Image (tube, rainbow, N blue to C red):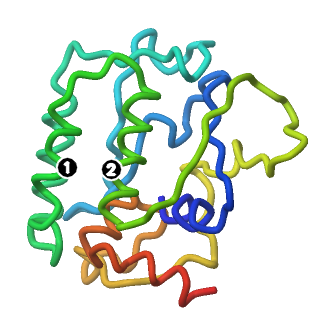
Amino acid sequence: MHCLVSIFLQAANPIIECYEYFERTTFRNRCEVAGPNGKITLSIPLERGRNQRTVMKDVRVCNKEKWQLLHFKTLSASYRRTPYFEYYEEELRPLFEKHYNFLMDINLDSLQLLNKLLKLNHSYALTEAYEKAPERALNLRRTFDPKMDAFDFLPVYMQNFEERHGFIPNLSTLDLLFSCGHRGVELFNAKQ
């Protein structure tokens, strides 16, 4: 989600919410990538499904099926021919091989890995309790929704399969990484 990268880069002290209730149809357990037939949604299966009233830090991953293997195969098939996939493939692989019990652990490991691969040294904190209306922070919990239109401040770059579908906004940061390498984040500075 390129808009999340942009907000993350602009925030002086981003804080990740751990104590809100899980909301379905959000990017909390999914991302979207470009494929030969258009947008592909990669969704992490959850125990108790998506209709649960569970605090984010306690949302459990359902590992009955080999979803990580399927996700990595989808990324490989979709991005193998991009300019930078081969440079990041081996560093990404452990994320898709490690056994996870909690969704929050996957999300934090993913954020940490992207921070490293994009050569960022951007720190963040985790909430220690839920605040409905945080007093000292900009509340962006409901800002990123898969059904929303793309933000107009996001950069456009050459994407895989663009000749078939045109530029597809709101894709995973992996799309930017595989298409532009770690210098892709410079596009956000140029756009502002």
Residue neighbourhood size for the residue with mark 1, other residues' Cα within 10 Å, grouped as few (<14), some (14–19), many (≥20): some
Front one among 111 and 178: 111
Q: Residue at x 22, y 13 (%)?
A: 64
Q: How many marks?
A: 2
Q: Quadrant of residue 172?
A: bottom left
Give the percent coordinates (x, y) of residue 127: 67, 31
In the rendered view, would you say 190 is above or below 57? Answer: below
Which amino acid lies under the numbered mark 1 shown in the image of this protein? Leu
Q: Earlier in the sequence, mark 1 or mark 2?
A: 1
Measure the alpha-carbon separation of dots 1 and 2: 8 Å
In the structure shown, which secondary structural element does the residue marked by tag 1 occupy? helix
Give the percent coordinates (x, y) of residue 76: 12, 55
Q: Are marks 1 and 2 in contact (CB under 8 Å)?
A: yes
Q: Which residue is mark 1?
A: 92
Residue neighbourhood size for the residue with mark 2, other residues' Cα within 10 Å, grouped as few (<14), some (14–19), many (≥20): some
In the rendered view, would you say 58 is above or below 177? Answer: above
Front one among 31 and 40: 31
Q: Residue at x 47, y 84 (%)?
A: 187
Give the percent coordinates (x, y) of residue 95: 23, 39
Q: In the visual, does 39 lie left or right of 76? A: right
Q: In the visual, does 35 lie left or right of 134? A: left
Q: Residue at x 39, y 47 (%)?
A: 112
In the structure shown, which secondary structural element does the residue marked by tag 2 occupy? helix
Residue lying at the far top in this picture: please name it. 48
In the rendered view, would you say 13 is above or below 24? Answer: below
Q: Which residue is mark 2?
A: 113
Which quarter shows the C terminus?
Answer: bottom right
In the rendered view, would you say 5 is above or below 21? Answer: below
Q: Residue at x 13, y 67 (%)?
A: 87
Front one among 96 and 117: 117
Give the percent coordinates (x, y) of residue 154: 55, 76
Q: Quadrant of residue 150?
A: bottom right
